[in-house]
Amino acid sequence: MLHYLEEALTAPKPSRRTFLKISTGALGGLLIGASIPRSAAAQGADAEAFVMPFVEITPDNQVVVISKHLDKGQGTATGLATLVAEELDASLAQMSIAFAPSNPQVYANTLFGIQGTGGSTGIANSFDQYRKAGATARAMLISAAAAEWGIAADQISIADGKLMGGGNEASFGDMAIAAAGQTVPEDVTLKSPDQWIYIGKDMPRVELPSKTKGSVGLYGMDADVEGALVAVTARPPKFGATVASFDATEALAMDGVVDVFEIPQGVVVVAENTWAAMEGRYMLNIEWDESNAETRGTDTLLEEYRALLDQPGLSAVGKGDAAGKLENAATVIEADYTFPYLAHAPMEPLNITVLYDGESAEFWTGSQLQTVDHGTAAAVLGLDMGKIAINTLWGGGSFGRRATPDSHLVAEAAMIGKAWLEKDGAPQAIKLVYSREDDIKGGYYRPLTLHRVRAGVDAEGNLSGWEHRIVGQGIMLGTPFADFAVHDGVDHSSIEGAADTTYSLPDMALDVHHPEVGVPVLWWRSVGHTHTAYVMETMMDELAEAAGRDPVEFRLAYLDQDPRKANVLRLAAEKAGWDTPPAEGVHRGVAVHKSFNSYVAEIAEVSVREDGTAKVHKVVCAVDCGVPVNPDNIRAQVEGGLGYGLSGVFREEITMTDGEVDQFNYPDYAPLRISEMPEVEVHIVASTEAPTGIGEPGTPPIGPAVANAIYKANGMRVRDLPMSKHGLA
């Protein structure tokens, strides 16, 4: 796969060195962009690789922001439109979004070096790019107006999408074609924060009208490619199994079923519609070869993982003398934690449409890693990159599920397109559809992970030594991302949030085991932070109790090197009234965590009912994510991330029996219901720091905050998740 990634980075690129200006066809118009620094993955490319076309202005006065990122509900599209509108002085009413084509030389995520969305980097890596794009468009429009009106450029102003000067007035559309002929400025001046009119203000989602109307083709699942047939695949019940033989007689006899054939992933049923395809799949008679399949169940894996907790692993952190400090500590706490496999379970299951004619191929899907998807399609079909188009559509949720390093969805679709052409001889658009059962039972989970921590406090109530061991599959191992995420065999995604904790822990040792298991794993919303934050923050509470100190004060004592983290903790405590007693029967728990360069503190108010179940009444959050481009979206992401995290810790769990996944759909993999969602209060720190991530940082602190409150309510330390195992949900 790494080979494909390198190949994708040689994709066709525009010829201008810094900016791209092209015609918009017969209508004409202006399309411009801004340059970026060379990314690490593209250091070998020539200077012409760094061309970033981000803004199109059409003669009908529309400002189309070209989003290099997938928007899967996290609001990146609105954020990018806000940045452009700010520097362009456009009217919000004229702003719209189009997704960029796949081209990593033009649309690379500057933090990844490839085109892709993830790690809460959408706004963080685009803040300057898209502002510069807006400012460049503004300068070219003014230059065009100055030439047409015969006045100096400094006599022209722009406000609310209109150019004005010397008694003249024009819309952007009026000047679009003329602006396209102007010289692209070498440099532009961006607004200072005191000049911002949109950044820092609540902005409505740019896609809301389309979503409200249910526009055709908005999402991959309703992509409207003319004449498309529908395909579903019967995949093996055990990971790693393959087709031994199959009989499709009954399936082919069904109305609407067009064809049945085998690909490496399983047996494909192609039909005129989704219902016929799924019904035809039920009628297949398949014998599976399980000689290379994963046949261990959850109980067996847990037994093996627990044995590894007793053995030294690969060293990831070795600071000071943790063992010596623990030997002399006044109190030592040892705790084991268990975190189950978790599915992503987005509302829109995976889907992709392919049209392959033997010489070129086109795909329609909610692509989250366009470069990897593009390279995979090229490799499977044996085509040059320029013969493949990836059309990115809106994604109906993801939480990591649409960003697979092996691009299995694209690979499967490409194989279906290839098999169809070889068997049936004529090009045909085919939409591959996963049911929710396919997705939940089909792998790509947050890894099953165990932790063991030994930590102590001395006679004065100070931290004295921290030993930490983690056992879990490495998400990055064996992927194109291993080069920068795996060091000396240690997958950083397994230890992030613990190994790089910003607490001052001078005596700390951390090691890790990465067992080989045939279950496909993937990043889940906030990746390793989902379990490391839980361990760090519940252990800090236990240590504070052992030291006889207040949990907030105890944490602050070890945040002397991280003032931003300390600040959000103080802010959350102030807004939650930490120093005042909560309502009768309600207990507060606190957690604070840094992830994706953002800081979130959460204080949960929880009660435990007579039947032992827990109710989360309210969560007060404090957030520092740098410049808050759109505060309303920040609040939404913190609320959504918090709810997603609650869902995971309360009752979500993927288990296996003899290698087969037990859960299949929402009835037995039950996400949080709206009636269970607590009141959420979000306080955003005013900041001039560069924007950082927000899609994921709200997730990690909620589990430990609730767990710490539950301990105060009933004395139970919840270390084996989900909480439903203990009657709490």
Image (spheres, rainbow, N blue to C red):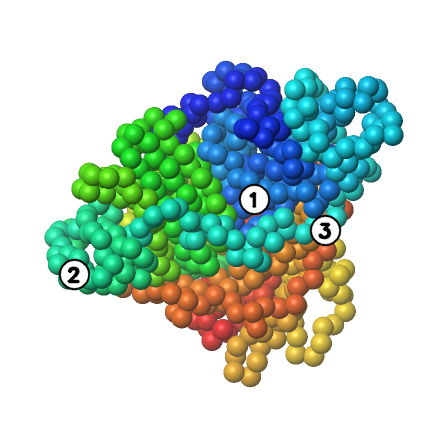
Q: Nearer the viewer, mark 1 or mark 2?
A: 2
Secondary element at tag 2: loop
Residue placed under numbered mark 2 in the picture: 253
Q: Identify the image quadrant of the N terminus.
A: top left
Viewer-proximal residue among 361 and 215: 215
Report the mark closest to the observer, 3 or 2.
2
Q: Residue at x 42, y 37 (%)?
A: 390
Query: Which residue is painted at 42% across and 53% down in the image?
Result: 221
Q: Residues within 10 Å of mark 2 (few under 14, many from 20)?
A: few
Gap between marks 1 and 3, in whole Å? 20 Å
Q: Tell me the SS state at disc 1.
A: loop
N-terminal label among 1 and 3? 1
CA separation, marks 3 and 2? 56 Å
Amino acid type shown at disc 3: Asp
Query: As rendered, which of 296 and 526 lies closer to the eye?
Result: 526
Q: Amino acid at mark 2?
A: Ala
Look at 73% across and 23% down and name the residue there.
Answer: 144
- Mark yes or no: residue 129 visible: no
Quarter assignment of residue 79:
top right
Which residue was labeled with disc 1?
Answer: 120
Q: Spatial distance from mark 1 to mark 2, Cα to Cα?
A: 48 Å
Residue receiving disc 3: 202
Q: Position of residue 454 (x, y in %)?
A: 50, 54
531 or 294: nearer the viewer: 294
Q: Is residue 438 above or below residue 143?
A: below
Q: Residue furthest bottom?
A: 610
Q: Mark 1 and 3 residues: CB-CB less than 8 Å, in contact? A: no
Where residue 34 appears, x then y in whole percent?
63, 26
Residue 517: percent from the left, percent from the top? 30, 49
Left/right of residue 160 with respect to residue 296 in the rendered view: right
Q: On the rendered structure, is 306 left or right of 283? A: right
